[in-house]
Image: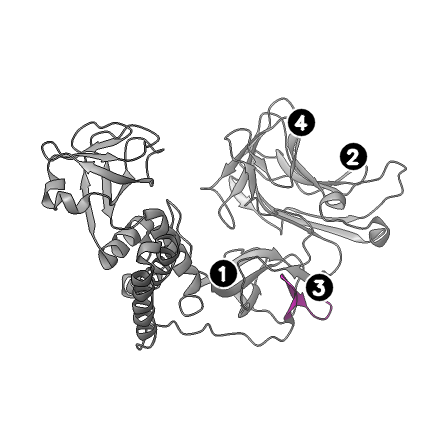
């Protein structure tokens, strides 16, 4: 379960002071909102000088913004604010009225989501590391541009002018794959691991470059993987059979003897290619040469990891994972750790259920009143007192049975450890495989 930012703002508003909500029933302006029905459920004089927060309107530029209320017209329910919104408020606009600045309330909710850690955490799995892999963005999860037909996958470069798309409904692992439509000739995407991964030519000569991937195509002999060291001669995988199914590492692979003897050899480029007029999908394309012993841990892994597992079968990226004992090249690692809750933005939700929601609201209230004590000097003492009261409530709630989350269980670290140096955290694998 999760609590949206809008719901969290409502809960914080109700807990700490005045809160009202409604829907406009007339056209306003950039400085007015009209509600001739619901606003009269409240004492109009009490609502003056409070905050109008737009929850949802017909114009996205107004949503999740707020202004201080300067007046409410007693005869027609026109709410006037002291500074203009970015656009006119139309009929059907939903809104909140809160006692405190919604921006401070939102910032306090974000701070609460962070400071409740590790008492409340998000059990998280990360599957972005592949043993020994040298290809960046190997699963096409990161995009610098997701415009349909001309999408750009980070670290990959187009071959000629294919139509490329970020595909979310047709994948083998993760959230995305790459769709490639070739037009005038053989086209696709490529990555030079000498420049991207920093592969040292002198240390790889005469070794074997292993490439594995997943390819989908419904036309025979139209899609494959390739490797080149000079841009003109290639080692190739099998062509896809055209089965209209994903074909994986057992079929789509290259084991290439690295050769830099040609005078023009200066690259180690891996490509995903499609023949003219055909369409194919690529996912989970990895490459390796030697054992790689250290990997940057994702920035989300603050503590731990508690568990590190490895694919039981390379041909089943979403199959069983077993505790890591002996690393195996080309297999995905599953890193389990205690992640932080999402600090909510305008559209995000906080991964916490309603039973622990009061804990979040209590922590947010303590932060909010502490902030107000520094920004509202005339009421600083009262705000500091309220901050202390709410922090006391949080401490008592944390002492209640079942409120704190139990720590995540852990695997025995037989073949891995975490190496820390300042802010850098790395996963280190031991031995050879």
- Label 4 vs 1, first from the N-terminus: 1
Seen at 19% across and 47% down, the residue is 20
Residue 100 relative to residue 340: left or right = left
Query: How far apart are the two marked residues, 4 and 1, measured between alpha carbons?
Result: 37 Å
Mark 4 surroundings within 10 Å by alpha-carbon count, few (fewer than 14), some (14 through 19), many (20 or more):
some
Asked if the magenta segment contains residue 142, the reply would be no
> Does the residue at mark 4 contact the one at mark 3 (Cβ under 8 Å)?
no
Mark 1, secondary structure of its residue: strand
Q: CA distance from mark 1 to mark 2?
A: 39 Å
230 relative position to 125: left or right: right
In the picture, measured across the screen, residue 185 lies left or right of residue 323, that is: right
- Badge 4 vs badge 2, beta-carbon distance below 8 Å: no
* Residue in the image at 44% along x and 66% along y: 117
- Of circles 4 and 3, the one toward us is 3
**Disc 1: CA contacts within 10 A as few (<14), some (14-19) or many (>=20):** some
Q: Which residue is mark 4?
A: 160
- Most extreme residue toward the front, as rendered? 378
Q: CA distance from mark 3 to mark 2?
A: 30 Å
Q: Quadrant of residue 389?
A: bottom left
- What is the secondary structure assignment of the residue under circle 4? loop
| Residue where numbered disc 2 is placed | 231
Element assignment for label 3: loop
**Quadrant of the drawing holding the N terminus:** bottom left
Residue picked out by circle 1: 125
| Display colour scheme | one colour
x then y, percent, for residue 210 = 72, 51
């Amino acid at each position: 379960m999760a609590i949206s930012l809008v719901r969290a703002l409502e809960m914080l508003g109700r807990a700490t002071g005045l809160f009202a909500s409604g829907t406009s029933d007339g056209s306003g302006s950039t400085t007015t909102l009209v509600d001739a029905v619901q606003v009269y459920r409240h004492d109009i004089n009490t609502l003056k000088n409070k905050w109008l927060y737009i929850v949802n309107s017909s114009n996205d530029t107004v949503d999740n913004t707020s202004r201080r209320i300067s007046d409410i017209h007693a005869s027609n329910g026109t709410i006037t604010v002291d500074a203009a919104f970015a656009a006119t408020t139309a009929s059907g606009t939903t809104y909140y009225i809160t006692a405190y600045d919604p921006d401070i309330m939102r910032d306090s909710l974000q701070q609460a989501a962070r400071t409740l850690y590790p008492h409340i955490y998000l059990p998280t799995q990360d599957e972005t590391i592949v043993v020994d892999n040298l290809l960046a963005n190997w699963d096409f999860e990161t995009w610098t541009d997701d415009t349909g037909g001309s999408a750009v996958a980070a670290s990959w470069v187009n071959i000629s002018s294919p139509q490329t798309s970020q595909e979310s409904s047709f994948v083998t692992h993760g959230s995305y794959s790459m769709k490639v439509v070739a037009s005038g000739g053989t086209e696709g995407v490529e990555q030079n691991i000498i420049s991207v991964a920093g592969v040292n030519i002198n240390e790889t000569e005469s070794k074997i470059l292993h490439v594995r991937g997943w390819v989908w195509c419904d036309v025979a002999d139209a899609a494959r993987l390739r490797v080149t060291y000079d841009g003109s001669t290639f080692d190739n995988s099998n062509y896809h059979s055209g089965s209209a199914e994903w074909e994986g590492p057992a079929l789509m692979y290259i084991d290439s003897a690295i050769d830099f003897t040609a005078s023009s050899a200066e690259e180690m480029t891996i490509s995903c290619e499609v023949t003219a007029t055909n369409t194919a999908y690529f996912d989970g394309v990895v490459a390796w040469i030697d054992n790689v012993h250290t990997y940057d841990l994702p920035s989300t892994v603050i503590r731990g990891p508690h568990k590190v597992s490895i694919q039981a079968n390379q041909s089943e990226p979403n199959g069983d994972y077993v505790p890591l004992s002996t690393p195996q090249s080309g297999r995905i690692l599953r890193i389990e750790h205690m992640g932080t809750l999402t600090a909510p933005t305008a559209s995000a939700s906080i991964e916490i259920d309603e039973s622990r929601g009061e804990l979040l609201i209590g922590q947010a209230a303590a932060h909010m009143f502490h902030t107000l004590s520094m920004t509202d000097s005339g009421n600083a003492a009262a705000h500091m007192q309220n901050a202390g009261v709410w922090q006391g409530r949080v401490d008592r709630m944390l002492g209640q049975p079942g409120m704190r989350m139990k720590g995540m269980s852990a695997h025995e670290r037989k073949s891995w450890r975490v190496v820390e140096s300042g802010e850098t955290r790395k996963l280190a694998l031991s031995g050879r495989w």
